[in-house]
Amino acid sequence: MDYNPFSLVGKTILVTGASSGIGQETAIACSKLGARVIVTARNQERLQETFDQLETIDEGHMQLLADMTSQEDLEQLIASLPSLDGAVLCAGNSTTLPLQFGSRQKFDEMFDVNFFAPVELLRLMYKKKVLQKGASVVMIASIGGTHSFMPGNGVYGASKAALNSVMKYAAREYASRKIRVNSICPGMVDTPLIHRGTITEEQLAEDAKKYPLGRYGRPEDIANGAIYLLSDASSWLTGHDLVIDGGFSI
């Protein structure tokens, strides 16, 4: 049987933050399902590593170097993009910081990467009509700030909660062009971001025990959710925040 509502054959998909973690896994997964994939990140060497792992190279995949916090880079990226059937906005950062140390500078730094950069990209893609009619946009948010409120997560959680809110407004406003906008709210996912030394490996192992399914998420868990939201299988779904967290929020 050839029937597969999750197929991405014939679709052109942009993936930001594609040099590692969720973004890298999502880009590779999209290529495996037949999509033409445009990957972007700010590190050329790591972006090339992702690009080299994309399948169906004859689909005409592209890699575009860009710093999402740079307005100039964003505008150059928009000018270089073909018409898109979908986009997964994965670029982001995290920190563990008690609110008493959450200065305005710390909030600004986090919001620049996690909120303003993807929102500006989304605005420009819509305004410049890079997103085709019927396109699907997936924003990687978090259960932090929406479903879970752990100590030390306030600065990060606030940026992701704001992103999730804009997703819903965009879904309402962009529906006139049949453009769908959804988000994924992951729990803790085992990516390089969580192994930077702010939390010890012992603390991470102990924290993973709090998840009913007994482990942190893997990048492919989130990538599979993104595939669903990009595909025709979710054609009647917009404005939804899909929680993928191994049961943590319950």
Image: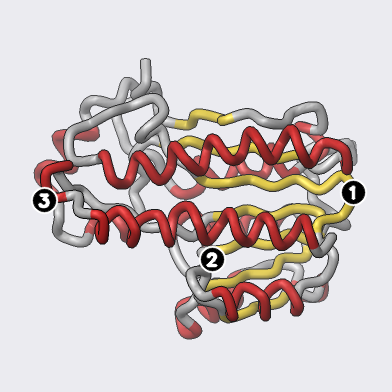
How far apart, in angstroms, are the residues tagged by discs 2 and 3? 26 Å
Q: Which residue is mark 2?
A: 18
Query: x, y (%) of residue 18?
Result: 54, 65
Of the 4 image quadrants, the one containing the N terminus is top right
Q: Specify the amino acid type for callout 2.
A: Ala
In this rendering, which labeled residue sits more in front, label 3 or label 1? 1
> What residue is pinned by disc 1?
133
Q: Secondary structure at mark 1?
A: strand
Task: Name the residue type under label 3.
Answer: Thr
Colour pattern of the rendering: secondary structure
Residue 32 position (above or below residue 97): below
Residue for point 17% across, 34% down: 151
Where is residue 240 drawn, in percent x and y?
Answer: 63, 28
Provide residue 121's location: percent of width, then percent of height.
63, 61
Q: Disc 3 versus disc 1: distance between alpha carbons?
A: 46 Å
Query: Crowdedness of circle 3 by 10 Å Cα count: few (<14), some, many (20+)?
Result: few
Local secondary structure at mark 3: loop
Question: Is the residue marked by circle 1 packed among few (<14), some (14-19), or many (20+) residues within 10 Å?
Answer: some
Q: Quadrant of residue 214?
A: top left
> Most extreme residue toward the front, as rendered?
104
The residue drawn where x is 71% and y is 65% is: 37
Say if 212 sits above or below 30 in the image. Answer: above
Report the residue marked by disc 3: 200
